[in-house]
Amino acid sequence: MISSAHILGQDESLLVECQQGFKLLPKVCAAFKQMQLAAAKDQIDIQIVSSYRSFARQLHIWQKKWTGKTAILDINEQAIDISTITNQQKLFAILTWSALPGASRHHWGTDLDVYDKKSVVESGHNFQLVCSEYEAEGPCAALNTWLSKYAQDFNFNRPYHTYKGGVAAEPWHLSFMPIAQKIEAQLDISLLKQTLINSGIEEPKLIIENLEIIFNQFVLNRGKS
């Protein structure tokens, strides 16, 4: 059983550097490299954009969005004027694109974000990691199609491939199913609650009041009930 500290992003001792500073669990890294080689034969250059993210890093991302230092986007990837919405609306808007600290799949060492580096470079595109880049004529459209066909052959799925009313669609997000599913079964809302209370996060009372909804709609990504 993986420790609570690992699940919360507070212990990275089990991780290895997989690619250019990006950390993953050893089995996940091995599977990714096998997939990367297979994709290269089809002229797809899968590279990591993001992998392990610590609790502290996720908290930093969250605080910047809450305080308005980083833009908050709506489901259509348009910036929201936070002066026009309530704090509860702001809370759910942030959750659409950014996980609560302690509740991110990127804490686990099983999940990573990928792109087609060669295609992006050759296109001269200013890469921003948005859905349009993985659709139609986007530089990562071929990667998106390839992952739909072959990712499961390497035990990866895409938990946010389709928007369900919780987390926004993220065609770039891969999860190593054999381990991620076991971690997901260990998720503990009471432990998350206590961790958040002691974290210094902005508006902890509001978060705790909505934590059960957050847990089901966003953490488990079951969408609106």
Image (cartoon, helix red, strand yellow):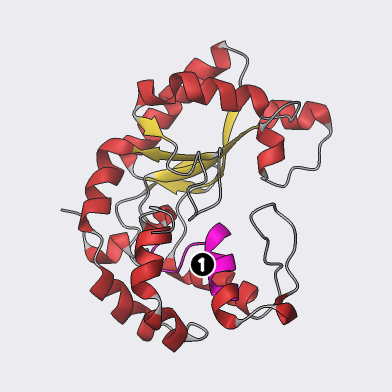
Task: Judge the density around disc 1: few (<14), some (14-19), many (≥20) Cα neighbours within 10 Å.
Answer: some
Q: Give the percent coordinates (x, y) of residue 34.
A: 42, 23
Q: Residue at x 33, y 40 (%)?
A: 26
Q: Quadrant of residue 97?
A: bottom right
Residue beneath the point at 47% across and 18% down: 149
Q: Which residue is mark 1?
A: 57
Taking the image as shown, residue 131 lies to the left or right of residue 26, namely right
Residue lying furthest front = 225
The outermost residue toward the top is: 41
Q: Is residue 98 covered in magenta?
A: yes
The one nearer the camera, 135 or 139, is 135
Q: Position of residue 3 (x, y in %)?
A: 21, 61
Is 74 within the magenta?
no
Q: Quadrant of residue 170?
A: top right
Q: Is residue 6 above or below residue 47?
A: below
Instruction: Report the residue at 57% width, 22% height from top.
Output: 145
Q: Is residue 125 above or below residue 50?
A: above
The kind of secondary structure element at disc 1 is: helix
Is 205 above or below relative to 152?
A: below
- How many labels, in total? 1
Q: Residue at x 41, y 67 (%)?
A: 214
> To which quarter of the image does residue 152 belong?
top left
Question: Could you tell me residue 83's position as x and y percent?
Answer: 73, 81
Q: Is residue 91 visible?
A: yes
**Magenta segment boundaries in residue numbering:** 90-103
